[in-house]
Image (cartoon, grey):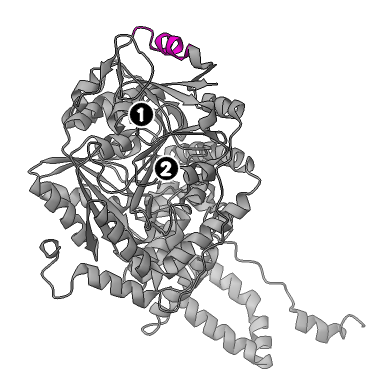
């Protein structure tokens, strides 16, 4: 059930072309993103200090990142003092190995999981499957993706590309093989689909020995982890198992407990468009007599320090994974998330993936900074004020720099030629006389198809401005 | 934890911290200033309205009516009750170390709360006396929660300021819900499908 992978995805333009041809996908996305945009606008409009909250949220994160080493050491110390075991992981393989080792130590063949972007990023389910350990996703959308052997396409709602009829079919076809089958009379009414998930997962919650989570925030001064959720599957995984392992990116640090208040205000409003999400759990290590008595926290780098070293791009690490930028993006709304070839799609994915992985290595990653019209809608809604357009432009420059040397591209050759032409009045005059002839020829011969397939090649005027000026003495004759 | 490393000479911890140090060598940022605040009392009418917006049941009552209102809310359902509840609940089961499976066989739970938040219609449990351990208010399908009017604070910063992060905290805003089907909210997934809030005083 873990066959689907982003590995080997084509570059964005090619993947986007395939997605654009899927009219069902475009319909599902337009409906879902339209709904959430309206909800967000309503609850954001209720607060008269919204801009102030955004500025504060960005400021808290910037300060946390600037002094990250200190905060990480404090977090480690507080967590340890509260009875948790802290592990560090340089990369995805190390992080997955820690979780697998904990599971093996308890001799389990399954774990229950809270929705967590970090665990998808590190390929945890696949790593556990290789050790014979089943990782059951318990968030409704993650369950839909897992049962459908599908890939996530949205940060908040990984199954946003599926409508209710498709979800019903997946439940009917696939639930039985994973545990309790879907009810016989299941319809596509959303409340019935939610109830089917409740029934299917309840037995897994009740018997699970090991739970796996991420964390939305990690408060350094108190050693407190925070999970923000809706369904109660998070509470189940954080509370019922004997052992809990939380996989936390090092950028999740919030220095103080008091500073958490800003994020608990901006995240639900930006994410699900609610004043507050149904459930938020916070815990600091082990609580005797309540919840897991063995608590592990894995602090993961996996490219975050690479992003942190990028002076323009480090602001991407402020991201609180709300997905507001996806919901307003005209490109995302039309192509969906799969075209981005990553667990982090949309505008934030277009900057986060190159920042985490580096440019000049993989064609797919290098294509992402171009997956944008630079319209800026993402920046306007971002609750931590990440200036995504500026980072995109900077990354485009980095991609170009990474590809210097070697055979020049058609575009580079054209720009060089244009530069020489404009540098000489004689050459420019000659070029202008040839333009009419040239565009006609280019059209007939199909030159520069990558450019002209999506754009009209303008018809050159019969006479250039300079020729007209000479002929008429500037319009005086 | 060398056992989890790859056997290289530098531990993952030291290397991650070194990378962080190098990456932030030139970074400076001052955290936004904030004044410390005393939690302000919240508007109880607004609290009740906003809890109801989440499709929770909300009732206001006087201190002497609470037991009758609890009994009416349970309507014959068997409830588990934590130590320190302070209200008599007929036919209730005490929490004497019930397993998750035991709790799954019980219809309802009655708890107190630590804080109510007027602006967002949120109830926060810190799982102290009368609130029970976390599993108690999670597994049964009906949660009856008694909040005193003087526990309601104005907004989220007031709530954060009045809570102790050393305790496990559960922030509850309405019954369990999901937005995972076409990004529209549907109530009733894994947590209690009915939240019944009694606002006292």
Residue A340 in the figure: left or right of residue B121:
left
Q: Quadrant of the N terminus of chain A?
A: top left
Answer yes or no: is residue A363 visible.
no
Q: Specify few, some or many for label 1: CA neighbours under 10 Å numbering under 14, 14-19, or 20 or more.
A: many
Report which quarter residue A300 is drawn in: bottom left
Task: Give me the residue at 30% from left, 12% from top.
Answer: B78
The total number of labels drawn is 2
Q: Chain of mark 1?
A: B
Task: Give me the residue at 34% from left, 7% from top.
Answer: B76
Instruction: Verify whether residue A444 appears in magenta.
Output: no
SS for tag 2?
loop
Q: Which mark is residue B131?
A: 1
Depth order, front residue of A74/A372: A74
Single out the residue that lies furthest toward the top: B76
What is the magenta segment's predominant secondary structure?
Answer: helix
Would you place residue B196 above or below residue A275 in this image? above
Would you place residue A269 above or below residue A185 in this image? below
Q: Chain of mark 2?
A: A
Can you give x and y, in whole percent of width and height, for residue B60 in the image? 54, 18
Depth order, front residue of A116/B125: B125
Q: CA distance from mark 2 to mark 1?
A: 51 Å
* Magenta stretch, residue numbers: B65-76
Answer yes or no: is residue B159 visible.
yes
Q: Which residue is mark 2?
A: A22
SS for tag 1?
loop
Task: Give me the residue at 50% from left, 26% from top.
Answer: B148
Would you place residue A294 above or below residue B34 in this image? above
Mark 2 vs mark 1, foreground winner is 1
Q: Quadrant of the C terminus of chain A?
A: bottom right
């Amino acid at each position: 059930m873990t066959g689907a992978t982003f590995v080997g995805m084509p570059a964005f333009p090619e993947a986007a072309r395939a997605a654009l041809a899927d009219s069902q996908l475009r319909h599902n996305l337009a409906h879902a993103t339209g709904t959430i945009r309206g909800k967000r606008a309503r609850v954001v409009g209720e607060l008269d200090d919204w801009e102030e909250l955004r500025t504060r949220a960005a400021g808290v994160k910037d300060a946390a990142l600037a002094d990250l080493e200190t905060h990480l050491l404090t977090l480690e110390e507080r967590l340890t003092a509260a009875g948790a075991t802290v592990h560090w992981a340089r990369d995805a393989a190390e992080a997955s190995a820690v979780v697998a080792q904990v599971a093996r130590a308890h001799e389990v063949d399954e774990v229950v999981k809270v929705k967590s972007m970090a665990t998808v990023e590190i390929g945890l389910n696949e790593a556990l499957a290789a050790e014979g350990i089943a990782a059951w996703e318990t968030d409704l959308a993650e369950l839909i993706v897992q049962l459908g052997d599908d890939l996530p396409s949205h940060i908040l709602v990984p199954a946003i590309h599926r409508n209710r009829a498709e979800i019903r079919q997946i439940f009917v076809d696939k639930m039985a093989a994973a545990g309790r089958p879907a009810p016989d009379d299941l319809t596509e009414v959303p409340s019935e689909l939610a109830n089917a998930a409740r029934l299917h997962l309840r037995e897994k919650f009740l018997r699970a020995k090991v739970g796996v989570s991420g964390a939305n925030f990690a408060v350094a001064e108190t050693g407190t982890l925070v999970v923000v959720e809706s369904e109660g599957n998070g509470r189940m995984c954080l509370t019922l198992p004997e052992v809990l392992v939380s996989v936390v990116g090092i950028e999740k640090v919030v220095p103080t407990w008091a500073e958490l208040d800003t994020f608990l205000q901006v995240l639900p409003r930006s994410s699900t468009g609610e004043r507050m999400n149904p459930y938020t759990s916070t815990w600091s290590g082990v609580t005797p007599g309540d919840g897991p008595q063995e608590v592990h926290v894995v602090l993961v780098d996996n490219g975050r320090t690479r992003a942190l070293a990028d002076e323009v791009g480090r602001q991407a690490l402020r991201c609180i994974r709300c997905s507001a930028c996806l919901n307003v993006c005209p490109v995302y709304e039309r192509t969906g998330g799969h075209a981005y070839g990553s667990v982090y799609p949309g505008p934030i994915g277009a900057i986060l993936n190159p920042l985490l992985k580096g440019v000049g290595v993989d064609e797919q990653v290098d294509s992402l900074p171009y997956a944008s019209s630079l319209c800026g809608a993402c920046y306007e809604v971002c609750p931590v004020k990440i200036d995504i357009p500026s980072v995109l432009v900077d990354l485009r420059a980095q991609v170009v720099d990474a590809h210097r040397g070697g055979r020049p591209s058609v575009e580079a050759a054209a720009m060089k030629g244009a530069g020489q032409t404009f540098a000489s009045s004689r050459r420019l005059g000659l070029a202008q006389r040839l333009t009419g002839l040239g565009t006609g020829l280019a059209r007939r011969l199909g030159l520069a198809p990558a450019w002209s397939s999506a754009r009209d090649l303008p018809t050159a005027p019969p006479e250039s401005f300079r020729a007209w000026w000479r002929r008429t003495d500037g319009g005086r004759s | 934890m060398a056992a989890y490393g790859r056997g290289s000479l530098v531990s993952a911890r030291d290397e991650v911290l070194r990378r962080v140090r190098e990456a932030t060598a030139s970074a400076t940022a001052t955290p936004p200033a904030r004044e410390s605040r005393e939690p302000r009392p919240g508007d109880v009418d607004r609290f009740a309205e906003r809890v109801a917006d989440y499709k929770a049941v909300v009732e206001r009552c006087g201190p002497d009516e609470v037991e009758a209102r609890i009994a009416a809310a349970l309507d014959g359902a068997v409830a588990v009750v934590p130590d320190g509840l302070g209200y008599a609940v007929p036919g209730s089961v005490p929490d004497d170390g019930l397993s998750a499976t035991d709790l799954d066989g019980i219809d309802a739970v009655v708890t107190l709360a630590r804080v109510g938040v007027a602006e967002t219609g949120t109830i926060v449990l810190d799982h102290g006396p009368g609130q029970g351990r976390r599993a108690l208010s999670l597994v049964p399908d009906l949660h009856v929660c008694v909040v005193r009017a003087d526990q309601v604070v104005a907004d989220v910063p007031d709530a954060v300021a009045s809570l102790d992060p050393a305790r496990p905290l559960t922030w509850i805003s309405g019954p369990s819900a999901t937005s995972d089907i076409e990004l529209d909210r549907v109530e009733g997934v894994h947590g209690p499908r009915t939240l019944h809030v009694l606002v006292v005083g």
